[in-house]
Amino acid sequence: MTAPALRPGTPADAAAVAGLWHAGWHDGHAGHVPDGLTAARTLTAFHERAPLRVSDTTIADIGGEVAGFVMVVGDEVEQVYVGSAHRGSGVAALLLDEAERQVAATGYDEAWLAVVEGNARARRFYENHGWHDGGPLPYEVSAGGSSYVSPCRRYVKRRVRARP
């Protein structure tokens, strides 16, 4: 397999990001969040959201394919998703490392992210990479014209450092 290259997201990536985001979101959230939220997270909804987020998106590109992405805003790692064909390949770890670097580069010494309580795979992944469960985080979400509270955990990583 070709090694992934990290690069900033562009408007041309929006459709690929939307597809990965939709599939990954449903893999990790379905059955763990309110049913109305799951129903509102349609592929169309992700195609509407993705173009608005390319400016804070880093892409893992493998041979011209968007293999995964991460979105970082301030000290929050908002989204980390990898296509199912690339899970277990190290792409997610590379993206998470880049997210930590971005958080540190903006002057924060602690990064945080929200993980749905029932997403055991993601929680194990973060814990295996030095993140710690900082406690409950009832995450308020608006989707499809309604508001929902998603049962999440706030994961934190202290002393993130900017790397060369």
Image: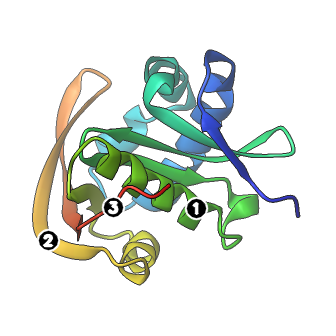
Q: Amino acid at mark 2?
A: Gly
- Residue 148 higher or lower than 99, as above or below: above
Q: What amino acid is at disc 1?
A: Leu
Report which residue position mark 3 lands on.
161
Report the residue marked by disc 1. 94
Please tell me whether mark 3 or mark 2 is closer to you in this view. 3
- Residue 137 in the image: x percent, y percent? 12, 58
Q: Secondary structure at mark 3?
A: loop
Residue on which disc 2 sits: 134
Residue at the image point whose x is 22% and y is 66% from the top? 156
- In the picture, measured across the screen, residue 102 lies left or right of residue 82, that is left
Within 10 Å of disc 2 (Cα), the crowding (few <14, some 14-19, many 20+) is some
Contact, CB < 8 Å: mark 3 with mark 2? no
Q: Amino acid at mark 3?
A: Arg
Q: Position of residue 97 (x, y in %)?
A: 48, 61
The residue shown at (44%, 18%) is 52
Horizontal relation, residue 110 to residue 43: left or right: left
Q: Nearer the N terminus, badge 2 or badge 1?
A: 1
Above or below: residue 29 compared with residue 106: below
Q: Are marks 3 and 1 in contact (CB under 8 Å)?
A: no
- 96 horizontally vs 126: left or right: right
Q: Residues within 10 Å of mark 1 (few under 14, many from 20)?
A: some
Note whether residue 30 is visible: no
SS state under label 1: helix
